[in-house]
Amino acid sequence: MFRLFPIICPERGSKQTFLVYKVGIIRIVGPSITYCYRAGYILAADYYCITFDHGICHFDLANNYGPVPGSAETNFGRILKNQLASHRDEMFISSKAGHDMWPGVYGGNSSRKNLIASCDQSLKRTGLEYFDIFYSHRYDGVTPIEETMQALVDIVRAGKALYVGISNYPADKQKEAYDYLTAAHVPCVISQYKASIAFPTTLQENLPVANENGSGFICYSPLAQGLLTNRYLNGIPAGSRASKNVFLHPEQVTAEAVARAQQLGVIAAERGQTLAQMAVAWLLSKDVTSVIIGASSVAQLDDNLQAINNIAFTEEELKQIEQIMQNQ
């Protein structure tokens, strides 16, 4: 089975080399980029250099990440050029296309026109000559799988990406995509899906398909937008995602959700972990390639990376976690 393990970051200066087992990715999401952009370019540059120093060498982008679409790629490109250019060959950089990006009928779908135009635009924004992985961000329900996959094949053959991946495809279309790409000798090396203790559905439905077809599997939203942390135990704090109604809605922060987080937190404490660390470790204990963590501060990054120190779960711990989540 093909596996992507961006596991080690060479020394930079006098800094220690960190081995990052399976956790090799930090996702450049809206909140992180927005925070850095408002605070100033220097802070953003420092932040991403620190992530690299921590052994994170796989950076996950998309053309529409922002919140202003394209701004995540633009900021990353500036930082890469000014701070990290000499380390390009030590880094694994991915991007995606398929969600709304520009007005018109071709601005946000899985068509050949959208993917190829998006890839060209993303390369321009980042200043890269190629992406290590370029994804089809979603199955749009309209475009034939053959058209989307052939676009990915042609992107690789044109030298614009080394590998291809898919994201958020339903299981039947996921298998069709694998079959087409394999026949074209450009296999799908990675598949990206939402997964967490609170949302294990894709681990049950999509992970087996990926494993059977030799694709790696990367999970995003491991902390369920913050519900699997201590952030909402005492209400909805100002500045949080739920307070802004972004990705997490206030009505989702229910008394039941808080109670589950508290119960899970007890198990985490017994393991010597925070709830966030246990949530990441739980995913890493599954047969996945890596887990995408979105951190808006160095403290959050440090906390999340500690998850790799204990990814073994006892049968009793797994049973307790399952029982808690069955009470949803």
Image (spheres, rainbow, N blue to C red):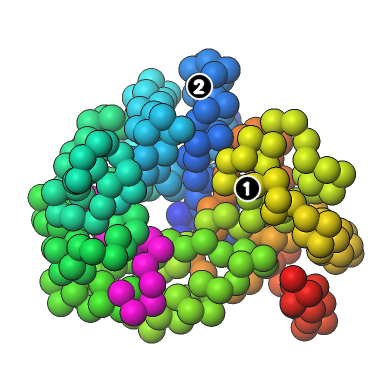
Depicted 242 relative to depicted 133: above or below: above
Quadrant of residue 179 in the image? bottom left
**Kind of element beneath mark 1:** loop
Q: Nearer the viewer, residue 51 or 77?
A: 77
Q: 190 or 136, which is in the foreground?
A: 136
Q: What is the number of the mark on residue 37? A: 2
Q: Residue at x 18, y 55 (%)?
A: 111
Tell me which segment is drawn in magenta.
159-173
| Left or right of 213 in this view: 205 | right
Q: Secondary structure at mark 2?
A: helix
The picture places residue 29, in percent across and down from the top left corner, at 50, 40
Q: Nearer the viewer, mark 2 or mark 1?
A: 1
Q: Please name the residue that numbered disc 1 is placed on.
A: 248
Which of the 4 image quarters holds residue 228? bottom right
Q: Mark number for residue 278?
A: none
Label 1 CA crowd tier, 10 Å (few <14, some 14–19, many 20+): some
CB-based contact (under 8 Å), mark 2 and mark 1: no
**Three-letter code for the amino acid on which mark 1 is drawn:** Leu
Name the residue at 84% across, 48% down: 233
Residue 39 sits in quarter = top right
Residue 272 % position (x, y): 85, 59
The C terminus is located in which quarter? bottom right
Residue 209's place in the image compared with 229, above or below, is below
Q: Would residue 169 be counted in the magenta stretch?
A: yes
Q: Dot 2 surroundings within 10 Å: few (below 14), some, or many (20 or more)?
A: some
Drawn side of residue 32 relative to residue 109, left or right: right
Tell me which numbered mark, 2 or 1, is placed earlier along the sequence: 2
Q: Is residue 128 visible?
A: no
Q: CA distance from mark 2 to mark 1?
A: 22 Å
Q: Is residue 243 magenta?
A: no
